[in-house]
Image: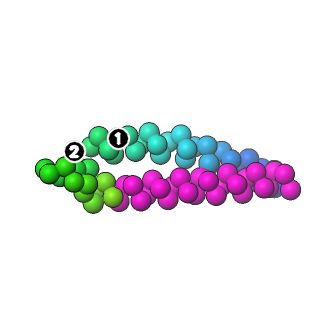
Amino acid sequence: MAVLAGIMLLVNALYNVIVWPRFWTRVTADPRARDEAGRRTRFYTVHAVLIGAALLIALVSAVAGVLLLIA
């Protein structure tokens, strides 16, 4: 069961590492990301925090997956 959990955590981490950076490029290109003066908007900030959190969770998942597989 631990092997299955480790593999699932690694798959989760891989999925997040593939998906979220691609989404980030769409967020930065979105016209709602900057105001008329070129300053970042709340849209930009909220998405930056969400994507950062998702990538942090991916890192934790990867570490936990590896630890489960080597234990």
* Residue type beneath disc 1: Arg
Question: Residue 44, how many percent across, how many down?
Answer: 31, 54
Residue 20 counted in the magenta span: no
Determine whether the residue tagged by mark 2 lies in a helix, strand or loop.
helix
> How is the model colour-coded?
rainbow
Question: Relative to residue 27, is residue 68 depicted above or below?
Answer: below
Q: Which residue is mark 1?
A: 26
Overall secondary structure of the magenta stretch?
Answer: helix
Determine whether the residue tagged by mark 1 lies in a helix, strand or loop.
helix
For the C terminus, the image quarter is bottom right
Residue 49 counted in the magenta span: yes
**Is residue 37 shown left or right of residue 3?**
left
For the N terminus, the image quarter is bottom right
Which of 48/6 is in front?
48
Which of 6/51 is in front?
51
Identify the residue shown where x is 33% and y is 45%.
27
Per the rendered image, the range of residues in magenta is 46-71
Q: Which residue is mark 2?
A: 31
* Residue type beneath disc 2: Pro
Question: Relative to residue 45, is residue 18 depicted above or below?
Answer: above
Which of 41/7 is in front?
41
**Is residue 9 shown left or right of residue 39?**
right
**Is residue 66 shown left or right of residue 57?**
right
Question: From where the camera sits, is residue 33 visible?
Answer: yes
Farthest residue toward the right? 71
Give the mark, 2 or 1, whose residue is nearer the N terminus: 1
Identify the residue shown where x is 47% and y is 56%.
52
Identify the residue shown where x is 55% and y is 57%.
56
Identify the residue shown where x is 35% and y is 40%.
26
Question: Residue 64, how many percent across, how many down?
Answer: 72, 57
